[in-house]
Image: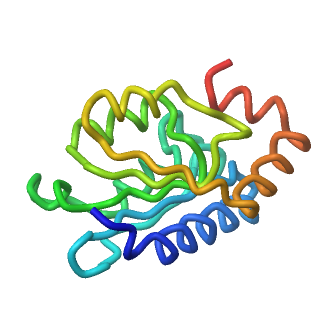
């Protein structure tokens, strides 16, 4: 699979991360794009603080906003996320058989899930996006207790 929609996907992921930050939440965003035609199937951002949720990470919010899709639809998609996916989000990617993940950055947080995704046959690409790194670092610096809560530490 080529990266035909990567710029579009990462732009949306960053827009969603920014939206989450502006709402007072964790700045992690994402989207799910159909690899064939570039259709955005869903987009979302971390909503743990906004909704008082234990599980609405950026990737989970993205999948939630896709609504119910036939299982086969996921098999030809790319999930774009502004930050390396945690173990919970990694599990969702594997469960739905999403074959490709593009990650904005993994400097502020690198999940062991990246390696596990590759071991499970998923193509993983880290684009090292400056905007994603900057907004995440700003959040961690300003709200370290909330960041550690988000990643379960």
Identity of the residue drawn at 75% across and 60% down: 130
Residue 38 x, y percent position in the rendering: 31, 79
Look at the image and tell me in which quarter the C terminus lies: top right
Q: What is the residue that sits farthest to the right in this orientation?
A: 142
Identity of the residue drawn at 81% across and 56% down: 134
Is 1 drawn above or below residue 113 in the view shown? below
Is 94 drawn above or below residue 16 in the view shown? above
Q: What is the residue that sits farthest to the top in this orientation?
A: 153
Q: Is residue 21 left or right of residue 74?
A: right
Is 145 drawn above or below residue 133 in the view shown? above
Look at the image and tell me in which quarter the N terminus lies: bottom left
Is 139 drawn above or below residue 43 in the view shown? above
Number of disc labels? 0
Residue 95 x, y percent position in the rendering: 23, 36
Identity of the residue drawn at 69% across and 48% down: 26
Q: Nearer the viewer, residue 19 or 125?
A: 125
Residue 108 is drawn in which quadrant? top right
Identity of the residue drawn at 53% across and 72% down: 12
Residue 67 x, y percent position in the rendering: 26, 62
Residue 24 is drawn in which quadrant? bottom right
């Amino acid at each position: 699979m080529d990266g035909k929609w990567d710029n579009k996907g990462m732009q949306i992921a960053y827009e969603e991360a920014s939206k989450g930050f502006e709402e007072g939440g964790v700045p992690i965003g994402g989207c799910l794009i159909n690899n064939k035609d570039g259709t955005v199937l869903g987009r979302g951002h971390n909503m743990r603080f906004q909704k008082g949720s234990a599980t609405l990470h950026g990737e989970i919010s993205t999948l939630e906003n896709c609504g119910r899709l036939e299982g086969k639809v996921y098999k030809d998609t790319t999930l774009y996320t502004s930050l390396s996916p945690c173990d919970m989000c990694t599990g969702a990617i594997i469960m739905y058989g999403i074959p490709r993940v593009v990650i904005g950055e993994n400097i502020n947080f690198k999940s062991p899930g990246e390696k596990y995704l590759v071991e499970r046959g998923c193509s993983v690409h880290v684009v090292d996006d400056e905007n994603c790194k900057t907004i995440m670092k700003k959040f961690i610096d300003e709200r370290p207790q909330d960041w550690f809560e988000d990643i379960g530490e």
